[in-house]
Image (cartoon, rainbow, N blue to C red):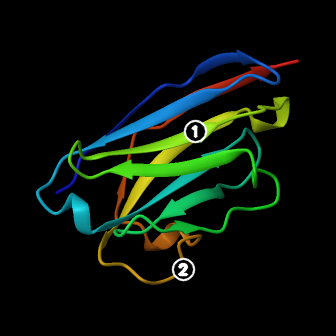
Amino acid sequence: QVQLVESGGGLVQAGGSLRLSCAASGRAFSTYAMGWFRQAPGKEREFVAGISWAGGTMGSPDSVKGRFTSSRDNAKKEVYLQMNSLKPEDTAVYYCAAAGPFYSGDYGDANKYKYWGQGTQVTVSS
């Protein structure tokens, strides 16, 4: 079992920044592929960013590319999502997820992730 606990969400003005954190349990965290997803009301869950067990970042969609950056600290068992230049359309519930040890498949496929955080609300006002 892996437990994921997210924090850092909240209300921010357009153009501002937020840093989301995901704290993980489990001795094998350093081998997990991790992903960030978001879901806005009335929309499907959307892949935002991924990061491999080795720290390599996966391609993000054009909607967030250049503004969002993922990173990880295996010593602290934490994953981060730095969000800059936020826009109202970024408003959504954001989730972190773990795919399993040494995952090498499609990071954008939500069905491949075994463990999920509870989600944290991000609201961007204009």
* Cα distance in 3D space between marks 1 and 2: 22 Å
68 in relation to 65, above or below: above
In the rendered view of the protein, which quadrant contains the C terminus?
Answer: top right
Q: Quadrant of residue 103?
A: bottom left
Q: Residue at x 68, y 62 (%)?
A: 60
Name the disc covering residue 106, or none: 2
Q: Amino acid at mark 1?
A: Gln
Q: At numbered mark 1, what does the secondary structure look like: helix, strand or loop?
A: strand
- The x and y percentages for residue 80 are 46, 42
Left/right placement of residue 72 relative to residue 17 reads left
Disc on the earlier residue, 1 or 2:
1
The residue carrying pointer 1 sits among few (fewer than 14), some (14 to 19) or many (20 or more) residues within 10 Å by Cα, namely: some
The image shows residue 40, relative to residue 43, as above or below, that is above
Taking the image as shown, residue 50 lies to the left or right of residue 98, namely right
| Numbered circle sitting on residue 102 | none
Which of label 1 and label 2 is nearer to you? 1
Q: Say few, some or many: other residues with alpha carbon within 10 Å of mark 2 (under 14 / 14 to 19 / 20 or more).
A: few
Mark 2 residue type = Asp
Residue 18, image x, y percentages: 60, 27
The quarter of the image holding the N terminus is: bottom left
Viewer-closest of 111 and 19: 19
Q: Is residue 9 above or below residue 4?
A: above
Residue 70 lies, in percent from the top left, at 53, 51
Q: Which mark is residue 82?
A: 1
Residue sitting at 74 percent across and 22 percent down?
A: 16
User: In the visual, does 86 lie left or right of 8?
Assistant: right
- The quarter of the displayed image where residue 13 is located: top right
SS under mark 2: loop
